[in-house]
Amino acid sequence: MSAPSGKTGCRLWFRRAFRVFGALFLLCLLAAGALTLYLNPDCERENGVVYGQRDGRDLTFDLVRPKRPNGLGVLLMVSGSWKSKPSSFGVWMAAPLLRSGYTVFAVSHVSQPHAAVQDTVRDVNRAVRFIRFHAADYGIDPDRIGVTGGSSGGHLCLMLATRGGPGPPDAPDPVDRESSAVQAVAVFFPVSNLVDLGASRENAHDGGPPKSFRKAFGPNGADREKWRSIGGEISPVLHVHAGQPPVLSIHGDADTLVPLEQSEWFRDASAKAGAPEVKIVVRRGKNHGWLTLPLDVRLFARWFDAHLKNAKPPPRSPGGGGSNV
């Protein structure tokens, strides 16, 4: 049998290559389609639910109900650099949670410097209290509420974990009498210590706040003499206690904005205080965010499955752990 001519062999090669590349292209299309479907689960969304006010501005959250709710709620802090824009929340950010049946509350706040970070901490406490007060309306269990977020959103979550607690029993507004304690936490690269910024590129090594956020902490935030007190009040690592909820943190070890040590410090301080588990999942070579981060929310869903479904009810009166904020 004679060998194929040069032209015939070339045609055969191109046909085979076309088939291979065509199959790969089809596989890529199918994978992209499957990912798009996964990140856009069936749900109902109600935008702009008002939970309070800050300096004449409405504080709002978007309510997202899954197709098959499991009766549990998770607050997602819409916050980066302590700035918040409700329209920046997309359902894809919480897709694994929604697919697991969690009702999601995408909580927004007034951005710094229009609101000091200290005020934002108070406002997200108000969000938890409001949602707990109206739990029956949202079809969730008021005694089992989770919280999630990343970076500054992670910081707000850890503040709820460590300082959330019963509201004043004599508060004029019944919402404010509710507890702001949460029962499980899952976060990305959270800020835990504002007094010691460690290896962060935001550390000006002058004993002050993060150098790009001098105006984020109110008129006294840039005062070095007052900063230690201000920063200490909103540093979760300084408020750990045995009654706080279990915490999962996913953190890249190449993060230069919020270094991995911030999660490690929180874990170590929590262990010393006798607190429940603080687990760190390290993403090797990852900085402050990565392309596949939305898929890591699947780990959050599993964490809430393990730690929220059998959570203990929050304290309903002063003295139950944490500080009233």
Image (cartoon, rainbow, N blue to C red):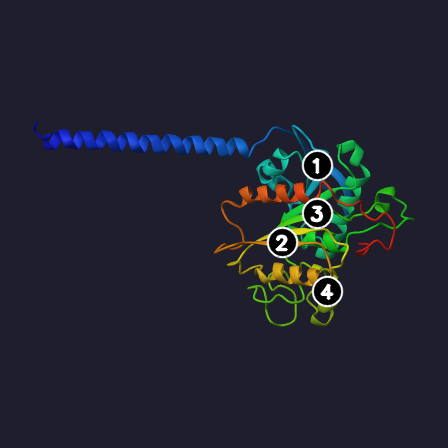
**Label 4: element kind:** helix
Q: Nearer the viewer, mark 1 or mark 2?
A: 2
Q: Which comes before the other along the chain, label 3 or label 2?
A: 3
Q: Could you tell me which residue is drawn at 70 percent across and 56 percent down? A: 117
**Label 3: element kind:** strand
Q: Which comes before the other along the chain, label 4 or label 2?
A: 4
Q: Residues within 10 Å of mark 1 (few under 14, many from 20)?
A: some
- Which label is found at residue 48? 1
- Could you tell me how far apart the alpha carbons at marks 1 and 2 are, in whole angstroms? 33 Å
**Is there a contact, CB below 8 Å, between mark 3 and mark 1?**
no
Q: Residue furthest right?
A: 170
- Residue 57 seen in render: no
- Which label is found at residue 119? none
**Is there a contact, CB below 8 Å, between mark 1 and mark 4?**
no
Q: Could you tell me which residue is drawn at 74 percent across and 47 percent down? A: 182
Q: Which comes before the other along the chain, label 1 or label 2?
A: 1
Q: Nearer the viewer, mark 4 or mark 2?
A: 2
Q: Nearer the viewer, mark 3 or mark 1?
A: 3
Q: Which comes before the other along the chain, label 1 or label 4?
A: 1
Q: Position of residue 36 (x, y in %)?
A: 51, 33
**Label 2: element kind:** strand
Taking 274 as reference, is 24 above or below it? above
Q: Position of residue 220 (x, y in %)?
A: 73, 65
Q: Residues within 10 Å of mark 4 (few under 14, many from 20)?
A: some
* Residue under numbered circle 3: 184
* Residue under numbered circle 2: 279
* Residue under numbered circle 4: 232
Q: Could you tell me which residue is drawn at 68 percent across and 54 percent down? A: 277
- Residue 242 seen in render: yes
Q: Could you tell me which residue is drawn at 30 percent across and 32 percent down? A: 20
